[in-house]
Image: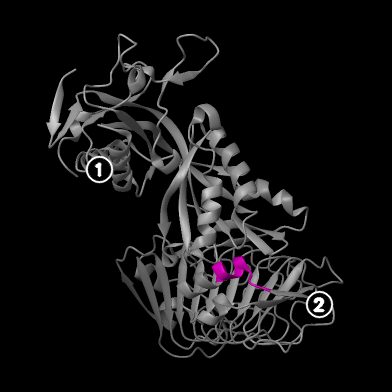
Amino acid sequence: MSVYVLGETRVDDTFAEAFPMRFARLVITAATDAWAQEAARSLTGFATSVIGCKCEAAIERPLEAEHTPDGRPGIAVLLFAMDREGVAKRVLERVGQCVMTCPTTACFDGLPGGERAVALGSSLRYFGDGFQASKVIAGQRFWRIPVMEGEFLVSESVGVGRGVGGGNLVIGAGDATAALAAAQAATDAMRGEGVALPFPGGIVRSGSKVGALRSKSMPASTNHQLAPTLRAQIGDTLVPDGVGALFEIVIDGVSEEAVREAMRRGLHAGAGAGATHVTAANFGGKLGEFQFPLSELRDPP
Amino acid sequence: MTLTLTLRTEPPARVLAAQLIPERLRGLTASAVAALNLRSGGERPAVGDLFDVSEEGTEDEALVLAGDLRRFDDVGARMSSGRIVVHGDVGAWAGAEMAGGVLQIFGDAGARLGSAYPGARAGMTGGEIVVSGDAGEEAGAGMRRGLVAVGGRTGSGAGLRMLAGTVVALGGIGAEAGLGNRRGSLVSGRPLEPLPAYAFATRFQPPALRLQLLRVRELGLAVPDAMLSASWARWSGDLTELGRGEILVFEDEEPEP
């Protein structure tokens, strides 16, 4: 595979392959930033991959009090699923279990005017057992659900947008410590508006391939070609000489542009933080609608 | 486009201003608006006889009324979209049976602000009314949806037979409020003695009210910060009706333990 060089880093001339997904943006506010964080972390828990978790979700960014609907500290969260129905189900479950339950929170639609809205408060309100009430405020309907603390306020519906899921970078270095430091520098640079990094800390160490060599029932299995411990026992290893560990960063974004620019930021930050090798995962271009060639990310952000 | 009507002289009799709403004036030039006739006693004065009419090409679509309009009733009544801004006081029935849009009155409003006309069950069904000064009796009577927010006080009988919706009076809701209220919210910025058909529930920080007060502030009223963070007393009523309405009362000082 041809490579190009970015400082000390060799970058494979390959591409990340990504898929169309649907997403919702939730704005969770609370009395304190800490409680908003609690709710957001709970809501985005167990949401690393659609394969195993039915959705992918992550904190997008914290919001200053003056930028939230109710003027309290907040967190914007992005949740991705394969289709609108998937978004609707996951949002409803997760807001019901992780936000409504969390002290002091309220939950708002962060994508008003999204192409099609799905029900949130209009379904959750039944938890109110007939005692719920609604208010239309500035043209938007909210539900007030009486709870033991007082009231939980939630938007009637949330907008769903068309996003891109599965953008990625694979970052390697001489050993696991160095590779992780580079990957962390990359994730720090990548987070921001329009981007969700759904894995723990934004980083996956168990990158996968589609299917499995030895089992027909496994939908995915370890990316053995990038497992350094196997490089001497398989004939088709992709671990380059001198690389002792690799980490993958998966990026879901609200647009192709958001994913591409996050990849660009991550590539340059990783390269500047000790990555010796950067590549990307794809399926030979057969599965995904979107391709992000690393060669297009040469110019720094 | 902004259409501005500036009152020339006080009319000799009360004038019905219900025609002067954005959806009826849309697409009309200033001279066409000046030629419209209003009802006033037995007369039909032209708008141009009462007002100086001017238009200005702005992005915002608004109708501006300026002057002492205390003899003008039905200002913004039954409007369903757009924005009316009044600089001055208005008469009775302002925003009556309003269905949508925004009515901003920088002055006082007369009786029956945003209310139902006689015989109608439902009054306002949507939209937002903001009054910087005081409002008269029976504000929000029969209201089904929407917001009436008053910077000063409302007269007696606010929220009479209210179905739902919200009436806010930062300077305090007047006496005998919320008689026959089913699901509506009355919000009083000053302590009040609710009717016997209301029962005290609790003190809490109502999250929806916070959103509404922020909206009211956006629409031009000075909402004190203390109201956003304070606990409000919730009284439920009218318990002789459905009992799902509420009166929320701002209590500046902590209650005695």
Seen at 24% across and 40% down, the residue is A270
Residue type, mark 1 in image: Arg
Q: In terms of secondary structure, where does tag 2 sit?
A: loop
Residue A226, compared with residue B187, is above or below; it is above
Decide if residue A111 is in sight here: no
Judging from the image, the colouring scheme is: one colour
Q: In terms of secondary structure, where does tag 1 sit?
A: helix
The answer to whether residue B208 is magenta is: yes
Q: What is the quadrant of residue B39 in the picture?
A: bottom right
Span of residues in magenta: B204-212
Q: Nearer the viewer, residue B217 or B179?
A: B217
What is the magenta segment's predominant secondary structure? Answer: helix
Q: Nearer the viewer, residue A211 or A72?
A: A211
Residue type, mark 2 in image: Tyr
Determine which of the numbered discs, if any, sits on residue A265 in the image. Answer: 1
Residue B146, compared with residue A80, is above or below; it is below
Q: Nearer the viewer, residue A277 or B207?
A: A277
Q: Position of residue A73 (x, y in %)?
A: 47, 64
Q: What is the quadrant of residue B170 in the picture?
A: bottom right
Q: Chain of mark 2?
A: B
Seen at 44% across and 77% down, the residue is B47
Position of B31 with respect to B206 (left or right) is left
Q: What is the quadrant of residue B157 in the picture?
A: bottom right
Seen at 59% across and 73% down, the residue is B148
Position of B46 with respect to B92 (left or right) is left
Dot in front, 1 or 2: 1
Provide the residue designation for mark 2: B198
Seen at 65% across and 54% down, the residue is A101
For the N terminus of chain B, the quadrant is: bottom left
Q: Position of residue B187 (x, y in %)?
A: 65, 77
